[in-house]
């Protein structure tokens, strides 16, 4: 497989697979049709946003990294972050675009070339998400980057306020799809893209081990990936970081617990 020069990871917070499949989501469905995907991947427990993202970026389960709620705690043993590993191996640009401040710890100091943060409560509705995606598109179009993380949080907020699968939640899912679609037009032609969620949700909450909370979509798209392929083997959120480093020809750190998706 040819080494991926650019990788973009997009997380749509709280996106359930059934919301993606039943909603007005043409951009995401186009990525599914043109790439490899599963609607049956699993996240970690507890299925809260920060434990899930910490497992996503640091490659280990909460039992290993110690983050079990939405307060970040540094691990008692050093763990390499995905951003840190890519930056050290490639010596090329890395970036994060997010509006939930707790995600700042996903990239240790010295591992980022660019960062954009706008608190989600500083704008109405999903305006901060849309602003972030627009800013991400501009930056990614202008720089020879190795890796970027782009985060959309409004779907999760709507789930908590109105309920998962509510009309308000689905409106934010549709808005997320439009933001993804616009971002994709800004990316270099040979960019590998991963879209996933950190967790799902039920009623107005998440954090449990019920299927609605722990089942997540994972979409892999890139010039070297088979179009229209549905993954049949189990996929974990712990497998995302090893998959990205494998795409980039970077050895997987021995601390990481997942395996590259194949």
Image: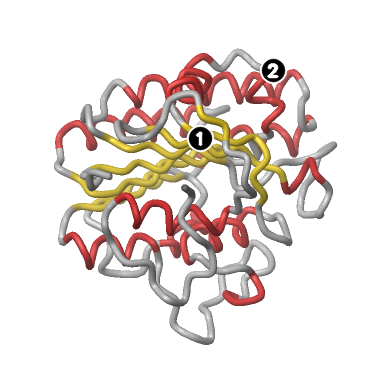
Q: Is 152 rendered above or below residue 46?
A: above
Secondary structure at badge 1 equals strand
Can see residue 121? no
Sort mark 1 into few (<14), some (14-19) or many (20+) by Cα contacts within 10 Å: many
Q: Is 63 rendered above or below residue 99?
A: below
Q: Marks 2/1: CA distance? A: 16 Å
Q: Find residue 219 and name its label.
A: 1
Among the 4 quarters of the image, the one containing residue 45: bottom right
Q: Quadrant of the N terminus?
A: top left
Q: Is 139 rendered above or below residue 173?
A: below
State which mark lies toward you, 2 or 1.
1
Relative horizontal placement of residue 203, taking residue 44 as reference (left or right): right
Relative horizontal placement of residue 261, taking residue 209 as reference (left or right): left
Q: Find residue 22 and name its label.
A: 2
Q: Which percent across, then down, holds residue 203?
A: 85, 36
Q: Which percent across, then down, holds residue 236?
A: 60, 53
């Amino acid at each position: 497989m040819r080494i991926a020069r650019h990788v973009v990871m997009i997380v749509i917070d709280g996106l359930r697979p059934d919301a993606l499949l039943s909603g007005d989501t043409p951009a995401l469905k186009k990525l599914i049709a043109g790439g490899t995907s599963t609607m049956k991947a699993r996240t970690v427990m507890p299925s809260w946003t920060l434990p899930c993202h910490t497992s996503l970026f640091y490659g280990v389960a909460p039992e290993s990294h110690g983050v079990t709620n939405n307060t970040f705690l540094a691990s008692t043993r050093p763990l390499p972050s995905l951003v840190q590993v890519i930056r050290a191996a490639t010596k090329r640009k890395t970036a994060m675009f997010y509006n939930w401040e707790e995600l700042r710890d996903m990239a240790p100091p010295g591992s980022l070339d660019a960062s954009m943060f706008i608190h989600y409560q500083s704008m109405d509705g999903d305006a901060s998400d849309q602003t972030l995606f627009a800013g991400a598109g501009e930056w990614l179009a202008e720089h020879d980057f190795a890796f970027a993380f782009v985060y959309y949080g409004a779907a999760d907020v709507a789930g908590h306020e109105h309920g998962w699968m509510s009309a308000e939640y689905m409106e934010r899912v549709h808005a997320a799809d439009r933001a993804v679609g616009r971002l994709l037009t800004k990316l270099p032609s040979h960019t590998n893209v991963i879209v996933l969620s950190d967790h799902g949700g039920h009623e107005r909450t998440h954090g449990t081990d019920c299927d609605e909370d722990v089942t997540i979509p994972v979409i892999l798209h890139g010039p070297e990936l088979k179009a229209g392929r549905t993954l049949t083997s189990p996929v974990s959120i712990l497998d995302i970081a090893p998959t990205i480093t494998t795409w980039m020809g970077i050895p997987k750190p021995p601390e990481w617990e997942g395996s590259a998706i194949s």
